[in-house]
Image: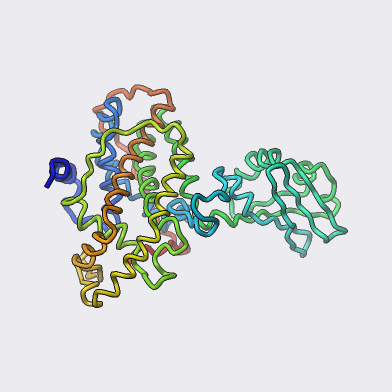
Amino acid sequence: MNNRVLFTTCLLALVFMTSFCDKPAWGFFGHRLINRMAVFTLPNELTGFFKKNIEYMTEHAVDPDKRRYATKHEGVRHYIDIDQWDKIPFPNVPRDFEEAIIKHCRIRFIAGKDSLYFDKQLTADSVVLSTGHFGGVRLALSYPIFVKYWKKVIKPLYYEDEWRLSGYDLDELFNTSYFQQNKIDVLIEDHFSEHGIVPYHLEATLAKLTRAFESKDKAAILRISAEFGHYISDAHVPLHTTTNYNGQLTDQVGIHAFWESRIPELFAEREYDFFIGKAEYIENPRDFIWNIIIKSHSNLDSVLQMEKRLSRTFDADRQYCYDERLGRTIRIQCPEYADAYTNSMGSMVEDQMRASIHAVGSMIYTAWVNAGQPVIEDVNEFVQIAEEPIVPDKNVKARPHDN
């Protein structure tokens, strides 16, 4: 065992001592580990505060996963089915969130009981809406003006069940009387978010954390940082970048938890090297975030193909074993099979975990720098944060990530 791995093993033993006395819930191990290790990458000005509150950073790393069953808006923040839209390096996927929604939305007009869709044409310079109904109409507008209007008027509707604009709104925007004359309202249908928004959510969360640092709101800093770490880590998982997120399209159901949870649980503590140095300031967060997505997706073929080939060389009873988890018996990949799979991928899982840790630390550090590097008073203060209950909603259906 080399010195770095020995150092990591000792450090892991120390940092897990208080938080992992009990076996962690299924799928939570990696997120807790990444958040905890990220604290040690932070600069001296932040280390004291985050170390004092490291238990919060660790335990609440999994809150976003718990919320996946509490609100329909949570699940899409964890992934992006980028192969739904394009191929690496995804030139046809707008990096601006509103522009991505605009590109893939549908615009439906409502006139009494009639409901029809406008034809929508977008260029870098213009937006054109047209229809042959109601006497026919062709409406054109500068694309930059449309985007500006969207961000002011339509963006605030994002969490509403219906994005509805009155005829008055549209007539004012397009400088026409068409909509009011024909008694037309417009519904805008978002067909982009359902395929995942994680890179856009990371950018929004960075801004949110920056504001928390600016206001020196310690509880908000910790809460947002803990959850930020979760989403950053998710973006590093290849299966969070594809429509085939759980191998359901290639007869590999369960591969998501196999790659993301089972392998780290078996090998991270004793084999992975988490000596990764200090967090770094990110000059261009948007490029940084999209490079994470590109790197993750570039690993996808190997994740799927290597497991598929390996499964043909192992009998079923050597692929799956039974284990006790939280008082129940579950079917899970055997250690021998997991070892063969991780060896076939080389250091991929370790590399992605290391990159996650460094990215979490670097994003927190970047938010702090962008906030003006505020001094956190009483760095040794243990911050009491009121627990917000997460209540599952039976109507919310989350993606199946477990075996």
The one of 59 and 353 positioned closer to us in this rendering: 353
Where is residue 138? Give x, y as percent.
82, 52
Residue reaching furthest to the right = 135
Q: Is residue 53 visible?
A: no
Q: Which residue is at a point 24% across and 72% down the rendered structure image?
A: 319
Q: Which residue is at a point 44% across and 27% down the rendered structure image?
A: 370
- Describe residue 20's horizontal placement relative to residue 393 as left or right: left
Res 95 quadrant in image? top right
The one of 375 and 388 positioned closer to us in this rendering: 375
Which quadrant would the C terminus be assigned to in this image?
bottom left
Where is residue 260? Give x, y as percent.
31, 57
- Describe residue 213's horizontal placement relative to residue 180 as left or right: left
Vertical relation: 130 (above or below) 203: below
- Describe residue 333's horizontal placement relative to residue 168 as left or right: left
- Describe residue 146's horizontal placement relative to residue 282 as left or right: right
The mark tally for this picture is 0
Q: Which residue is at a point 81% across and 54% down the rendered structure image?
A: 183
Q: Is residue 14 visible?
A: yes
Q: What colour scheme governs how the chains and residues are painted in the rendered image of this protein?
A: rainbow
Where is residue 140? Give x, y as percent.
78, 46
Where is residue 34? Give x, y as percent.
28, 45
Res 315 quadrant in image? bottom left
Vertical relation: 306 (above or below) 234: below
